[in-house]
Amino acid sequence: MKKHKLLPTTEKRNRKSENIDRLSALQIVKLINSQDLLVTPAVGKESNKIAAAVNMIVEHFKMNGRLFYVGAGTSGRLGVLDASECPPTFGVSPLLVQGIIAGGKRALVKAVEGAEDKATDGVIAINKNKISAKDVVVGIAACGLTPFVRAALKQAMKKGAGTIFITCAPEAVKGIPAKIIINPVVGPEVITGSTRMKAGTATKLVLNLLTTTAMIKMGKVYGNLMVDLKATNNKLRDRSIRIVCEITGLSKTNSARLLKKANGRVKTVIVMHFRNADLNNAEKILNQCGQSLRKAIGK
């Protein structure tokens, strides 16, 4: 008797939405929203694995390693998105967190036919980026089966890199080439196979948790303030001033004046204020304290 391939959850039909095309706009919105409510608890169940992944990432960052996201389609785009938001939010180099998407940059705005099926390209991407044991590679595949992603992870393991896999399909977990597997099970999509929906939302939440928590542990946040942000526009410049005001108690005028002296570096300005230091000494203090503002100002 012929064995049938086990269909991943992400490809199964959602019984609750079988007649969705017969509903009113309001009914469709409510149905989709009710399904979206399943996402956060599913991610929450993976908290221990996500925390373990964060610890791995922080450990590798401290070795001057990098974090790479590897994905195809929606998964790849979400990885690139999260990576691109790290420099302005946390003041890190664009090289620290990078996104690799099957099909290259053009796949960010247009589907590249067959790109996700090319396992060889996944291997090439790892070699091209000179992945080493210092780095961490996170494979993202909602269905867990994407050849490009699995081949990239396998190659990363050969290089000794830390490996993490994010998938919403429990059927695909067995045999995945990764040290840590994060598997938020959100169930079948409202539109069958459209993993840009619940699976995409779950993936975005997991990526938020990975980089945000890692950056907090790396001293990029003081309290809940982004003290390492790069003020690249008026909104962020205003935020920088407000952060300095909040922590130091200085007026907006004095905060802006100090920020100008320190080329907009929020963390440095705060050390200058509390340690009565000039720019160079404030930078030295921060370096001696491993860039931890809390240690640098003794609070």
Image: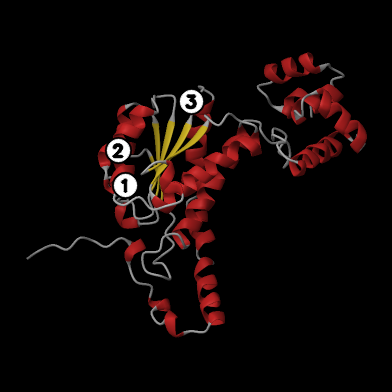
For mark 2, what is the residue?
Answer: 121
Q: What amino acid is labelled 2 in the image? A: Asp
Tell me residue 176's x, y (percent).
30, 44
Crowdedness of circle 3 by 10 Å Cα count: few (<14), some, many (20+)?
many
Q: What amino acid is labelled 1 in the image? A: Ala
Please report the residue visible at 31 percent of the width from the left and 43 percent of the height from the top.
148
Q: Name the quarter where the C terminus is drawn.
A: top right
Q: Is residue 83 left or right of residue 275?
A: left
Tell me residue 168's x, y (percent).
40, 56
Tell me residue 273's x, y (percent).
86, 25
Tell me residue 110's x, y (percent).
42, 52
Q: Name the quarter where the N terminus is drawn.
A: bottom left
Q: Is residue 297 visible?
A: no
CB under 8 Å between callouts 1 and 2? yes
Q: Earlier in the sequence, mark 1 or mark 2?
A: 1
For residue 265, the mark is: none
- Secondary element at tag 3: loop
What is the CA distance from the residue labelled 1 to the residue labelled 3?
28 Å
- Secondary element at tag 1: helix
- Which numbered mark, 1 or 3, is in the foreground of this view? 1
CB under 8 Å between callouts 1 and 3? no
What is the CA distance from the residue labelled 2 to the residue labelled 3?
23 Å
Determine whether 68 is above or below 62 in the image.
below
For residue 65, the mark is: 3
Please report the residue visible at 46 percent of the width from the left and 45 percent of the height from the top.
49
For mark 1, what is the residue?
Answer: 115
Q: Earlier in the sequence, mark 1 or mark 3?
A: 3
